Image: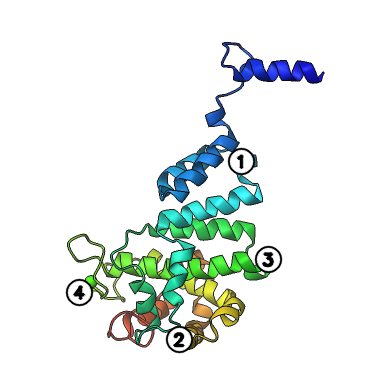
Amino acid sequence: MKRVFVIFFIFVFAGCSNIFQAPSKKDSDEALFEDAIKYQNSGDCTSALANFAKMSADFLARTDVKSSWIGAYACDCGFRFDTYISSFNSGSTGGSAILLFLMNSWTQKAVKPASCTAAETKMKEVGAAAINRTSDQNLFMLFLAMAKIGVYLRDNADRDSTDSLGDGTADAGFDGCSSTSISDNAVAEIGSGLGQIIDNFATITAILSNSNDIYSSLDALQTACGSNCSTDASAIKADAAKLKVLRSIINTNTYGIISGVPCP
Ligand SMILES: [Ca+2]
């Protein structure tokens, strides 16, 4: 039996023309996965995602595969965990309001906000809330949430300079209260990012509580947002009162990105 198997193996993989020939190895789930990791490691996140899109549902349900898939979406958004986390090394916002600090991590960087949302959605499939996930997964989710907030802000509020990748301050005419400046969807994504921060606050306390004003700013912001922030972006988007609170937070300089006034 073993000998028969060996002969069959050689026959199939020797490239013989045969009606029983196995699919090309490069199209197998394993091969697609291997190449997706290579693409991602080389910074080609779009090609990595294209490979994940070709994998079978059963294969994508594997924990290790799903983890890498989440990483590919985060990568496509612009998020690299190891480099992003270095933004927090100083432990300080440098005097900026917390949302401006989060936005400024993305100045002059290409971003794809929807891919940050997709990464978060996939991580919620792993565990809907912090209590359902491992500490490592929550650490990733926490920094992904902070990245998502910054990415949505930068993509909507700071697009000037010759390459449209921003200059670190909100563009002239930006109005956090106006859906022309920033859509309800983007505001809801920022609110759900804050909701993730609140849900992961035990992780924040564990890793950032010694780091002073970033921690204290996030702690004050979670109080200011209260029940208006949740991990459910759809619920925020459907609630005008929640959107108004979030727009006011964005529009004022206690936590937000400009010295505007609360929304009427
Ligand atoms: Ca600007």
Disc 1 element:
helix
Q: Position of residue 173 (x, y in %)?
A: 20, 74
Query: Looking at the picture, which amino acid does disc 2 mark?
Result: Ser
Disc 1 marks a residue whose amino acid type is: Ala
Question: Residue 183 placed where, x, y %?
Answer: 34, 66
Mark 4, secondary structure of its residue? loop
Judge whether 219 appears above or below 138 on screen.
Answer: below
Q: Nearer the viewer, mark 2 or mark 4?
A: 2
Disc 2: which residue? 217
Q: Which residue is mark 4?
A: 173
Nearest the eye: 252 or 38: 38
Q: Name the N-terminal-most of marks 2 and 1.
A: 1
Identify residue for label 1. Answer: 57
Pinpoint residue 131: horizontal percent, then vertical percent.
67, 70
Instruction: Locate residue 256: give its quadrant.
Output: bottom left
Task: Mark 2 vs mark 1: give the one in front.
Answer: 2
Q: Which structural element holds mark 3?
A: helix
Left or right: residue 41 compared with residue 161: right
